Amino acid sequence: MHQMTQSQSDPEQLKREHLQLLKELRQRRMQRCRRLAGRYNASDAEKSKSAKLGQHPELHHHNSTTSNIPVAQIFQKQLFISPCSDCSDHDTEDEDSFSTGSVEQLLRKINSQLEADTAALVESTQAATKGVTTSAACGKKVMMRSRRTSAGGDNHRNGYSGTPDFENGVIVKQRKELQLLVSELRERDTELNELVNSHQKQLSNWEADRKRLIVLEEKLRQKDQELQEKNGQLKSAMSRLEESVKQSEERALQVQELQKQQDRLQDESAGLRGTCEELEDTNYQLDRRLRETSAQLVQVETRAGQLEQDVHTAAQNLHQLLHRLKASDASRKELQSQQEEQRQENEQLRAEIRKLAGESRDLLRVNEKLQQQTEQLQKDCQLAAERERRKDELVQSQRLKQERTDAELQQLRGIPGANEDSDRWAAASKRLGGRESSSGRLHSGHYGNGNLPYYSSSLDKSVLYSKDLRDYASDLA
């Protein structure tokens, strides 16, 4: 959570640093311009002194006019106009990013002050050049008088040939220095442009992320509504499942199947634990990346601290602006805390949704298995009905056989010497009747639920009948 707050507070810190750097560069430009103006004033004063001491007036006038032109052009075009326009562009971009009226007013005041300072410097340089031209005119008059009075042409020519080279060398050096300063200022401007572009990209990314969060919140609301509807459906399904479970609790086979299902669910939970461990590994890697980024941010902050030592002079002018920004920072922190709370709530809701989805899947699987079991039970019932029908057929066939045997016994009774055999046959038939009744009792007592296999009673009857026939055959023999 602490890392998230740091990452969200970085863009505003970068904005502040950018503004401080802009103010620092402006002040440095003003100082350099003043130094250059002082140098040109000193050089013009030296020229005026040399003109008074006896240099050629026409050459001095020519050099002074040529030296005055680049000074005004350089101070107006190269140093003040183009950089200040760039800085104003940067300031407008910063004002758009902050979007506050107070900041715009402060920046406008700073720009107006800088423009006034530049105009004052240009006027001072122009006044210095005018003073040099007046001193050059005075020098001309003095030299004209010296020409009329003096007769040494050779000495005059020697003085005439030495001074222009020295003045041209000074002018060239000054121009080179100005060009170097202009190149440095342009490089600084390019660096500032790059910084501004990077800050704007970061701000655009932050706004895009916030829009995405809003869209995701709307989607979550819709999904919450869908989940509520599905919860109602699940409740109705649960009521149906409870009825089916009450009916299935009486059977031991279903208990075993449920145990098997529990084993399967445990296996699935073991697989889910493996996936959770993989997700934890991915989270650890992401945390490590975040730490690396935080270390990089610390390095950037150390560099910014080194720059703040140079920017201390500009911080005094921005003290009022920082007080106003503190209120906005407090509101921003409150909004961030609210966003974090909403995120935590969303995460909790997602976890609950996942749990409910897992439970619904398990219940659906249980429902499918119960349906399969009901189908199997229906098939078993059909088979039991067929078995009972077959049992009835076998009973009828046994009755027919018994009737035939009774008829044969009656015929044998009519034959002389077969009374004993008839008595034995009657006893065997009584035994069969008693055993059939006992088997019927067993069938009705032990297997009252109707789950007796169809061949049990028929086999008992056939076995008894075969034993009686064997006894009868042995008696006849």
Image (spheres, rainbow, N blue to C red):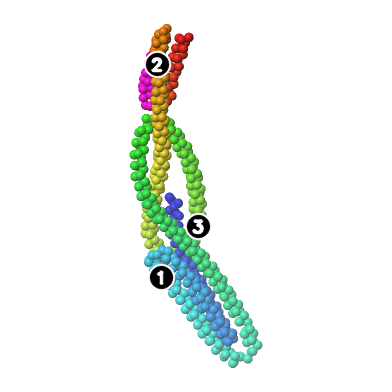
x 42%, y 69%: residue: 110
Say if mark 3 contacts mark 2, CB within 8 Å. no
Q: Label 2 sits on what residue type?
A: Ala
Q: Earlier in the sequence, mark 1 or mark 2?
A: 1
Residue 200 % position (x, y): 46, 62
Residue 94 % position (x, y): 44, 65
Q: Which stretch is magenta?
A: 429-450
Dominant SS of magenta comes to helix
* Residue 279 visible here: yes
Residue 89 or 356: which is nearer the viewer?
A: 356
Q: Residue furthest front?
A: 415
| Residue located beneath label 3 in the image | 300
Q: CA distance from mark 3 to mark 1?
A: 31 Å
Q: Residue furthest bottom?
A: 148
x 49%, y 68%: residue: 28
x 51%, y 64%: residue: 194
User: Disc 3 on helix, strand or loop?
Assistant: helix
Q: Which labelled disc corresponds to residue 239? A: none
Residue 64 or 114: which is nearer the viewer?
A: 114
x 37%, y 66%: residue: 101
244 to 49, vertically: above or below: above
242 to 27, vertically: above or below: above
| Residue located beneath label 1 in the image | 109
Residue 3 % position (x, y): 45, 51
Residue 310 % position (x, y): 49, 63
